[in-house]
Amino acid sequence: MSEPILKTHEVVKIYRVNAGAFRGKRVLKAVNGVSIKLEKGGVLGLVGESGCGKSTMARIILGLEPPTSGEVWLDSHSVFDISRREVARRIQPIFQDPYSSLNPRKSVGSIISLPLRVHKIGNSAEWNRKVEGIMDVVGLPRQLKRNFPNQLSGGQRQRVAIARALIMQPDIVICDEPTSALDVSVQAQILNLLIDLRNEFGLTYILISHDLAVVEHLASRVAVMYLGRIVEEAATKEIFQKPRHPYTQALLTSVLTPEPRLGLPETHLGVSYPNPLDPPPGCTFHPRCPKATQRCKTVTPEPVIESGRLVECFFPESI
């Protein structure tokens, strides 16, 4: 097997949060020992509830935030030994909200060409040629080049964000909820565009999403996060056909069905989410887990890897 294009080892990110006027600072572990591997040309889906650490992990990989501890390697080289410009050239983001991720004072052409100008690649004539070329690729009419973001639809704005991410021809694109702010009618267009671009340019994606249908459609491998930890990781087909961790099972149960007589799904997770400032002892999922025993309340489970599949549970569903 070839060397992964990107991998992390035991990445930890700790914030010190003000707990109140008389309580001082408290420790928040947003990411707690995350190790992932990303194969070239693959799509890794990161899923989990809000606050589980997905976006924090993405910012660490992008180099926007340093980890408290742990390592991030890009082609077997530590990203901390690579210049920030080189990391930015090879890893680009597509953010969740196309309404706030684009500078409203800049034209579409200026927004898309910004990475070229920052990295001092080419001249104005080459910038113009490359901007028009990438606009053709992502399905944006060239006459929109002088328009401003407020003159575009949501789908067009997200295409601008995609064009800006791809104009440097990166190896890895991190898609942080790329369709959640869009109308349902536009979401499928953007997802199909991402698939076409991956096939055309040989891109590697990290896809962060709450929408499990999007993940199933796009990802080749899925990592499920809970309170800063990856509790299950496997090929997409294995995750969706036979989830082994109780939390993964609950997430899949929560997916809405178009069948009206079935009503709202019941996840049995309760209405409250654990306080990340005061995580439960032992297995952090045990207060919401139907399988939890006394052991789960006091002992932290170690991740078990079998046939390329990771499960962090004392009682994983047998295959």
Image (spheres, rainbow, N blue to C red):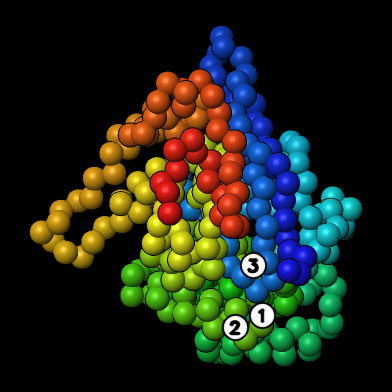
Q: Provide the secondary structure element on which disc 1 rests.
A: loop
Q: Closer to the camera: disc 2 or disc 3?
A: 2
Q: Which residue is mark 3?
A: 173
Labelled pair 2, 3 in contact (Cβ < 8 Å) = no
Image coords of residue 86 (percent x, y): 83, 64
Labelled pair 2, 1 in contact (Cβ < 8 Å) = yes
Image coords of residue 182 (percent x, y): 40, 67
Residue shown at 51%/20% (left/top)?
298
Q: Distance from label 2 to label 3 (Cα)?
A: 13 Å
Q: Distance from label 2 to label 1 (Cα)?
A: 5 Å
Judging depth in this view, the residue of 303 and 265 nearest the camera is 303
Amino acid, disc 3: Val
Image coords of residue 279 (percent x, y): 51, 26
Dot 3, crowdedness within 10 Å: few (<14), some or many (≥20)?
many
Question: Position of 26 compared to 179: left or right?
Answer: right
Q: Closer to the camera: disc 1 or disc 3?
A: 1
Tell me the number on the disc at residue 202: 1
Amino acid, disc 2: Asn
Judging depth in this view, the residue of 85 and 301 nearest the camera is 301
Residue shown at 47%/79% (left/top)?
192
In the rendered image, which quarter contains the C terminus?
bottom left
Q: Provide the secondary structure element on which disc 2 rests.
A: helix
Residue lying furthest top: 22
Mark earlier in primary sequence (1, 3): 3
Q: Which residue is mark 2?
A: 199
Q: Provide the secondary structure element on which disc 3 rests.
A: strand
Q: In the figure, residue 91 lies in which quadrant?
A: bottom right
